[in-house]
Amino acid sequence: MVILMIGPPGAGKGTQVERLSRRYSLSKVGAGDILRQEVIKKSELGVKVEEYMKKGMLVPDDIIIDMITRRLDCGSECQGYLLDGFPRNQKQAQRLDHLLEERGEKIELVFNIEVSEPELIKRISGRRVCTKCFRLYHIDYRKPRVDELCDNCGIPLIQREDDREEVVRKRLTLYREETKPLLEYYRCQSKLVDINGNSHTEEVFRQISAYIDSHLTHGSHSKKAELK
Ligand code: AMP
């Protein structure tokens, strides 16, 4: 099973993917997380992508597609994948379809998490992250047990450089221009599920899980009926 999570930066995709991957034993493939790990390791890939990321630009398609291909090859033992942050434009979406077809797999569901722009800015500017396990926190909504330290690793949390407001605005523009058109691409294939991401994390998780459960039990036709 392959599930995609699409939404603007700050929509809560990472938080949902973290929980969903545990619940459904799916392998989590977070494009941004993998890239950040490479930057921290100062690997050849990390050095190539660091400047694009700092500026809130998209990393070139060939680099990202190559990275995702290798990542999917590593997880061949799992029940499926939850993709977060990939694809982000039409070219990536087409390459992903092709890649999955070659592997005899296909995308089952695409969740579109919608959140208003003022709420996104509020969420992102308060976001903090652990540089070791990548767990996400928020200065108001999801505080660590001990001030500014990761609950898992005990190391100081940081604010991502691309979470500064001017970079966030650029990332939101890129989302509108490059990624949002993908929603129609998946809607036409009857794979898209719109989720109101303004609700509380728990409620968003409940809604997404209901769709997945229904899909697993009955297939795609009864997706909407289950939520009523
Ligand atoms: P994210 O954590 O998903 O917000 O991603 C952080 C940054 O990683 C983005 O602003 C891009 O610079 C880069 N990135 C992540 N996913 C992709 C992708 N699919 N294509 C190109 N760049 C990406």
Image (cartoon, rainbow, N blue to C red):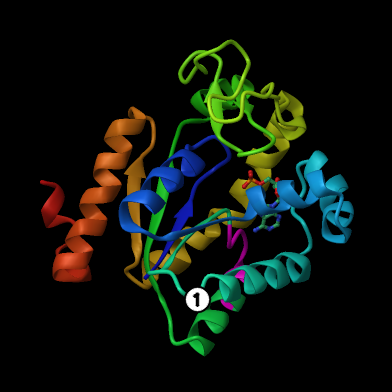
Vertical placement of 66 versus 20: above or below?
Answer: below
Vertical placement of 79 versus 36: above or below?
Answer: below
The residue under label 1 is 76
Residue 34, how many percent across, how many down?
67, 53
| Quadrant assignment, res 107 | bottom left
Most foreground residue, 159 or 93:
159
Horizontal relation, residue 150 to residue 212: left or right:
right
Residue at 44% from the left image edge and 48% from the top image edge: 17
Residue 30, how many percent across, how many down?
58, 53
* Region in magenta: 86-94
Residue 31, how many percent across, how many down?
63, 55
Horizontal relation, residue 124 to residue 185: left or right:
right
Most foreground residue, 13 or 222:
13
Vertical placement of 177 versus 67: above or below?
Answer: above
Would you call the spot at circle 1 few (<14 residues within 10 Å), some (14-19), or many (20 or more)?
Answer: few
Horizontal relation, residue 153 to residue 220: left or right:
right
Number of callouts in the render? Answer: 1
Residue at 62% from the left image edge and 62% from the top image edge: 89
Tag 1: residue type?
A: Ser
Secondary-structure class at tag 1: loop
Horizontal relation, residue 53 to residue 76: left or right:
right
Residue at 53% from the left image edge and 30% from the top image edge: 117
- The N terminus - image quarter: bottom left
